Amino acid sequence: MSTAPAATGTLGVGPHGRELRLLRRFATPLETVWAAMTDPAQLVKWIGRWEGDPASGKVTFLMTAEGRDAPPEDCEILQCSPPHRLTVQTSVGPALWHLRCELGHEAGTTTLLFAQRVDDDPLGSIGPGWEYYLDRLSAVLAGEDPAHVDWDDYYPALSEHYEQLGD
């Protein structure tokens, strides 16, 4: 990246408890952002892909941006209200992550609120990770190559911000 990324996450209380929240704004139609987050052909460009039948309420998610050794994750779709809300619960190793995405659109700008329910989760690694992936999404939506978003710019550089949120 040409400039160092900024830590944007905050802690708040959401519909399912305490959560880490990250907000992004795009000069892109709502439906385009929704497709980038849900269509396997778009999703794979910045984070991964899902396999299975989402109508069943469960899919398998593969983090392709993590390299070839990343294990598949079971993902339960808790709410899907296109093109505004997606809530999933996914297994990450032994942990369960509850993730919520809410999209809105006003005056030519689409907003994405991404939230992860947190308890005693390691915010110092989780926060920089979501900053990284959301910036990869931003790059794709801007027509840029997400490979230019470098993980080493995020971790451990943004860790302190997120560790202090949990204090």
Image (spheres, grey):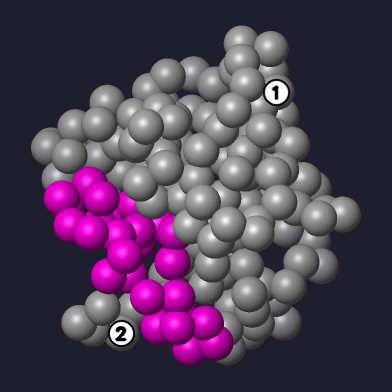
Secondary structure category for the residue under label 1: strand
In the rendered image, residue 13, in percent from the top left (x then y), is placed at 65, 52
What amino acid type should be assigned to the residue bearing mark 1? Lys
In the rendered image, residue 149, in percent from the top left (x then y), is placed at 33, 70
* Viewer-side label of 2, 1: 1
- At x 26%, y 78%, the residue is 1
Where does label 1 land, which residue? 58
What amino acid type should be assigned to the residue bearing mark 2? Ala
Question: Is residue 14 found left or right of 147 in the rendered image?
Answer: right
Within 10 angstroms of label 2, few (less than 14), some, or many (20 or more) residues? few
Question: Is residue 82 found left or right of 137 in the rendered image?
Answer: right
Specify which label sits upstream in the sequence, 2 or 1: 2
Q: Assess whether mark 1 and mark 2 are in contact (beta carbons under 8 angstroms).
A: no
Task: Give the residue furthest to the right.
Answer: 94
- The range drawn in magenta is 132-158
- At x 15%, y 45%, the residue is 27
Q: Is 6 situated above or below 63?
A: below
